[in-house]
Amino acid sequence: MSTAARYRLHVQLDEIAPPVWRRLEVPADLPLRDLHRALQLAMGWSGTRRHVFEGRPESGVRLDEVLARPGDTVGYVYGLADAWRHTVRLEEVRPAPARQMGDDDGPAVRLLDGARACPPEDVGGVVGYDVVRDAAAMLLHGRRVPDEVAEALAAEYPGLAPAEILAALDEFDVAAAARLVAGVWTLAEAAPPLLRSLLDRAADPTALLSLYRDVLRAAPVRLSAAEVAGAVDDAAWLVRRVGAEGVPLTGDGSLEPGLVHEAAARLGLDEPVPGTDGADLAGEEDVRPVLWFREVLTDLGLLAAERGRLTATADALAVVDDPRTLWDRIAAGLPVGDDPDLQDAGAVLLLRLAGSDGALPRGAGAGTGAAFGAAARATGPGDPLAERGFLVDRDERTGRALASLGGDAAHLDEVDFADVRAAARPTRVLLERLGGFHPDGRGYPGDFPTRVGVALARQALGAGEVTVGG
């Protein structure tokens, strides 16, 4: 918890009566980026719209640089189309709490009180919200409303009677919202560095934190020394085959066809390789798994291409005969990618895998499954994150987690697990070659991770229980 002074904030939606408001306690030095996150959770917004602090830059700015004395205010606008404007007012400044060694003062951000639910996000701003309330009240008293308004009500509140719609507009469970805010901050503060870096950039961190919660709940995974050696065997073979002297590359920087054919056979690829009689061997572009594996090992710094030759690096040659050290070297290089988008997608994929236990669900067969492994189970009523709807559909949460890293979270529902799988190709290729996925119904790597895949993911993230080589 921050050692800064504590601010008590009153947050109220403008131009709405009766008022929709919340009271929060936060550190005075809270970054505005994190204040945005707190406001989203406390109000009940989804985080899928753009936002702005009026007249203030957000990046690198702390709350105590904006609000200094009780009575100071700052405007916060969410949803630039509907323009939900909030007034954030500093009510009270409290001294930093005195702490003893080992004290645990709980989450840095707390929701203390509040009233009434936030409006539906696509209702059309304050005017649209008033139309919804008036229409529900008219229907309650037997009066007619325009057909398009009635249809909009039915779409927003399916199956609810007018009285229930009015109740939903007013109902706000302070205790449940407080659990949500506290739960998110407790998880976030304890997150390992890789996940922390994602959370710091996520427009809405809830999906990331929900996946991380699965990791913390998952059963321990243990790998034997023999399993570790088997996992890194193909990588070790290619490092040795290339060696310190290296192998020549073609004019376009590809492996020569003979080595492509040799590598395909070594990797057990069943894709057709032209020229099996040796007369017209396939190039690297024709056998993409070989190309991708070579590229991934290059990204990891185990191979290097220079002056027309591919060589094994000194780093790789130093660890190639020690499977456990090579495993650690590979895990330290995850997620793989030569640009931030590839690394983000790879990290989200690792987070998804780390929450499994490595078991293949009964009857899984081909295809993806949302609830794989014993860790993926419905949350109970006391789970602070359950109230945001992230229950057992890990694939949906994985898509939303990646979408949240896009900056404004405007398209959280438009990214699914297939998008993550494609965007994380370098990381997935490496995991496939190391035996990180159970085969699907056709014998190809599927989407359910093995214990090897889970162990690599957990070690790379620095999260979850894993024992390797013991």
Image (cartoon, rainbow, N blue to C red):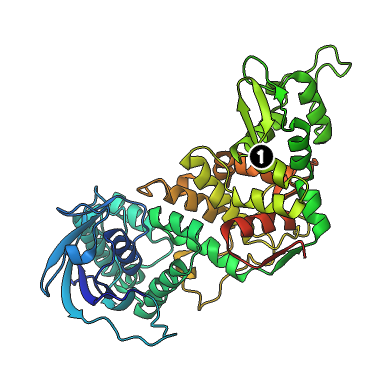
Q: Residue at x 24, y 58 (%)?
A: 61
For the point 71% across and 47% down, the residue is 319
From the top left corner, tell me how far across and down residue 283 is, in percent.
72, 19
391 w.r.t. 370: above or below: below
Q: Is residue 392 left or right of residue 193?
A: right
Residue extending furthest toward the top = 279
> What is the quadrant of the C terminus in the image?
bottom right
Rendered residue at 74%/41% (across/down): 235
336 is higher (above) or lower (below) than 186: above
Horizontally, is 219 left or right of 39 in the view? right
* Residue at image location 35% in from the left, 66% down from the top: 41
Snapshot quadrant of residue 240: top right
Q: Is residue 196 visible?
A: yes
Circle 1 packing at 10 Å, graded few (<14), some (14-19), many (20+), is some
Amino acid tagged 1: Ala
Secondary structure beneath dot 1 equals: helix
The residue labelled by disc 1 is 314
Residue 13, image x and y in percent?
20, 65
